[in-house]
Amino acid sequence: MERNEKIANRIKELAAEFLVREGNRTSLINVISATCSPDMKRATIYITVLPIDKEKTALEFAKRKRAELRQFLKKNMPIKIIPFIDIAIDLGEKNRQKIDELLRNG
């Protein structure tokens, strides 16, 4: 596994831990994956939110917490430069869930 992938996996694990700890318990935020740019300057964390009607609020909450998340990553990762973090809804996972629901109800 290359360094970029290892760092992305570690960011994913730590982001999940951070969001569970900081979350307000009105929604469940699942960290599905994380990716890092080749230069390691940017990372995107992909999440899903349950219930779906809390998605917008949860995404806004997670984005507001980015500075604190970076500090948390800095403390818990042995790398010099922590990438700029962006957070996005994992549309692939969302589409998969929709297909599952259609198959169950169809």
Image (spheres, grey):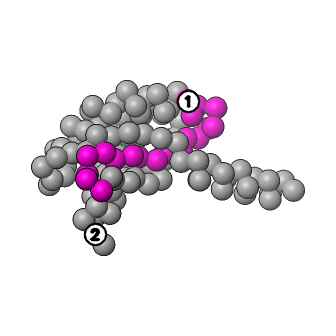
Can residue 17 be seen by looking at this rendering? no
Q: Which residues are magenta?
A: 38-56
Residue to which mark 2 is pinned? 2
Q: Can you name the residue that lies furthest to the right here?
A: 106
Q: Is residue 54 left or right of residue 97?
A: left
Label 1 belongs to which residue?
Answer: 56
The front one of 19 and 32 is: 32
Which residue is situated farthest in the front direction here? 39
- 50 or 47, which lies in front? 47
Q: Is residue 20 above or below residue 63?
A: below
Mark 1 element type: helix
The x and y percentages for residue 93 are 59, 53
Q: Amino acid at mark 2?
A: Glu
The amino acid sitting under disc 1 is Lys
Of residues 86 and 54, which is closer to you in this image?
Answer: 86
- How many C-alpha atoms fall within 10 Å of the one at disc 1: few (<14), some, or many (≥20)? few
Using residue 64 as the reference point, say whether residue 28 is left or right of it: right
**In the rendered structure, which disc, 2 or 1, sits on the residue that comes first in sequence?**
2
Residue at 28% across, 40% down: 84
Which residue occupies 55% across, 29% down? 56
Let me know if residue 46 is in the magenta part. Answer: yes
**Above/below status of 43 relative to 66:** below
User: Which quadrant: the C terminus?
Assistant: bottom right
Count of numbered marks: 2
On-image quarter of the N terminus: bottom left
- List x then y, in percent, for residue 77: 19, 52
